[in-house]
Image: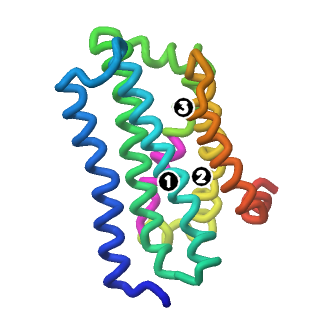
Amino acid sequence: MRLTAKQITWLKVILHLAGLLPFIWLFWAASQGYFSADPAKDIQHFTGRMALKFLLASLLISPLARYAKQPLLIRTRRLLGLWCFAWATLHLTSYALLELGINNLALLGSELISRPYLTLGIVSWVILFALTLTSTQYAQRKLGRRWQFLHNFVYLVAILTPIHYLWSVKILSPQPVIYALLALGLLAWRYKKFRQWWR
């Protein structure tokens, strides 16, 4: 049975809650001293993982809609992408404010260039920013065929962000490896689309 427009609306509500409630929890956890001795790093990793989760979910939508024969699922893809960008922005902000500090924001540019894993992160954020700005139907009509080419750069983000995560941890743990494998699996699932863009 295919999902109806009303069911998709409720699904969007659930997805919005999935994006918002972790932020509320994050604020509560920080205020209650829930994190470890290095809360700045904990917050950075949490926000980064949330961005990665929404990125992977957005990549899952198209093949899932096709194979499950649920075309209306496509309507949730933009929402997932916007939440991905929101959490990625929180991730970048948490690094700038909590890791560097307000008084050292001038160092942000040099840090992003001198540390390769940060370079991958900021490149991914810039791409997500461009995709967010052009995610509207108006932008799609205005850009024409170029819109699809631009939005296929999400595959590059799906490559760079797991590497960024793996590179950022001092001690390798299962979590970044799992996210990297999930991203690899999704890219493999969409191999034909990915190869077409790459060529």
Location of residue 123 in the rendering, given as x and y in whole percent from the top left corner: 56, 35
For the stretch drawn in magenta, the main secondary structure is: helix
Q: Amino acid at mark 1?
A: Leu
Mark 1 and mark 2: span between their CA atoms? 8 Å
Classify mark 1: residues with Cα within 10 Å, few (<14), some (14-19) or many (20+). many
**Label at residue 154:** 2
Q: To which quarter of the image does residue 127 belong?
A: top right
Q: Is residue 144 above or below residue 124?
A: below
Judge from the rendering whether residue 59 lies leftward or rightward of residue 109; answer left or right.
right
Q: Amino acid at mark 3?
A: Gly
The residue wearing badge 3 is 121
The label nearer to you, 1 versus 3, is 3
Mark 1 and mark 3: span between their CA atoms? 15 Å
Coloring basis for residues: rainbow
In the rendered image, residue 99 lying in the magenta stretch gets the answer: no
Q: Amino acid at mark 2?
A: Val
The region drawn magenta spans 126-136
Residue at the (27%, 42%) spot, across then down:
23
Question: Which comes sooner in the sequence, label 1 or label 3?
Answer: 3
Question: Which comes sooner in the sequence, label 1 or label 2?
Answer: 1
The residue wearing badge 1 is 131
